[in-house]
Amino acid sequence: MEDSEKNKLLAQNEIQEIQRQANGWNFNKPVNPYRKFFQEVVGIKKPLLPPEIVQGYAQSIKALKEFQLCTRQIHNAIEPEVQRILPAVNEILKNYKELTDEIRIFERSLQSIVNSIDWRLIMVPGLSEEEKQKRIDAFRQWGAYGWTMIPHASFKYFNAKPMSKKEANRKALACFRTKKQMEEFWQAFEKKEKLKKSDFDEAVVDFNNRCYKSCAMILYSLIDARTIRLQGKPKDNPLTDAKNKRKRFRKSGSAASNMIKKKYDQIHEKDMHAMLFSYLAREGLFYALDVFYKGGDDFKEQPDIMNRNFVDHGMLHRKVRRIDCIQLFLVYYNFLTFEEQLTARDRKELKKIE
């Protein structure tokens, strides 16, 4: 018998077997998806397709049936074991969820503790008084050139005294060259409690669009606001006020920053050098504030470093530059940091500034 005749015979046998099985199925139910197929294709009614195609359908259906049988056998084999271990698995998942919740709570608590620690309060071991003074002079010089602590740079960055303003600018600006460095810088502000986000965001937009003068003016207002709010509301003294014939008011600008530093140093006179790291950062900050808020002296001499009086009063001849805004962003950041480290006693005493 030729191969073609054998194939036809096999196809007929397959079709007859499917027909035999199909005869026992209820095709009157409209929900049966095979009703039309068996009626029109396989042969309950007159087939519409040639035997070769029908044979292909038959083989596909047979394969599907075999696959269904195989999966049913697998399911029957593993179902008892699944049911046996399912309670244990559920208990493990329950314990895992409780454990992960506890871990998250612990992580949040640990992060809160870490954030509350002023790592700069830690003493540098083995430093002589001469070495300490060199560090203090270095931070003061950095501040005099307008540079304060850089949050995404090493604390040791400021340990060496810069020989010139040009050297200080070159070294500091190396921390603000790339997009990644700037993103790290902006992210550092997100953790600051007293950040006035709407104004800060506007200053960042101005900075990114190279609108440096408006950026600087916003930053000066943000710094002013913090120095003013640290002071208590002025309390009227009838005798003094009547004599001077003027109302009391809170200080701003250099007067505010100088009084805050003076009052803070009085409070911490005994432990000032014991908390060396904090002291260094604070010295650099207030030396920079002295420069940025230096009196204009009737605007006779243009400032070498950014100055609030010249900018806010429209008396600055040169353009405000990118470096000026970076320095002001740093001052704002470091003042927020200084404010976060104040104790309840510090705040109470600073409210007495008059």
Image (cartoon, helix red, strand yellow):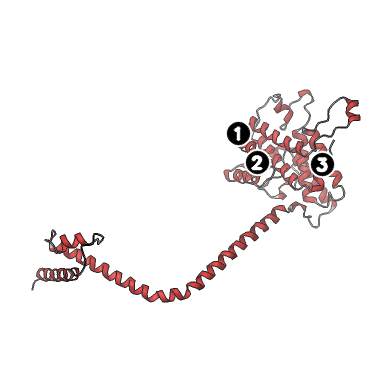
| Whole-number angstrom distance, CA of label 1 to CA of label 3 | 33 Å
Depth-wise, is mark 3 or mark 2 nearer the camera? 3
Q: In which quarter of the image is residue 137?
A: top right
Residue 266 shows up from this direction: yes
Q: Mark 1 points at which residue?
A: 206
Residue 251 screen position, x and y as percent: 80, 33
Q: In which quarter of the image is residue 82?
A: bottom left
| Whole-number angstrom distance, CA of label 3 to CA of label 2 | 34 Å
Q: Secondary structure under badge 1? A: helix
Kindly indicate whether the residue at mark 3 contacts the one at mark 1 (C-beta within 8 angstroms).
no
Residue 303 shows up from this direction: no
Residue at (13%, 61%) from the top-left corner? 47
Q: Secondary structure under badge 3? A: helix
Depth-wise, is mark 1 or mark 2 nearer the camera? 1
Q: Mark 3 points at which residue?
A: 350
State the mark number for residue 173: 2
| Whole-number angstrom distance, CA of label 1 to CA of label 2 | 19 Å
Closer-to-camera residue (4/168): 4
Q: In which quarter of the image is residue 56?
A: bottom left
Residue lying at the far left of the rendered structure = 1
Where is 287 relative to 316, above or below?
below
- Dot placed on the residue nearer the N-terminal end, 1 or 3: 1
The crowding category of the residue bearing disc 1, from other C-alpha atoms within 10 Å (few below 14, some 14 to 19, many at least 20), is some
Where is 322 relative to 264, above or below?
above
Q: Secondary structure under badge 2? A: helix
Quadrant in the picture for the C terminus: top right
Closer-to-camera residue (318/119): 119
Q: Mark 3 is on which residue type?
A: Leu
Q: Mark 2 is on which residue type?
A: Leu
- Dot placed on the residue nearer the N-terminal end, 1 or 2: 2
Q: Mark 1 is on which residue type?
A: Asp
- Dot placed on the residue nearer the N-terminal end, 3 or 2: 2
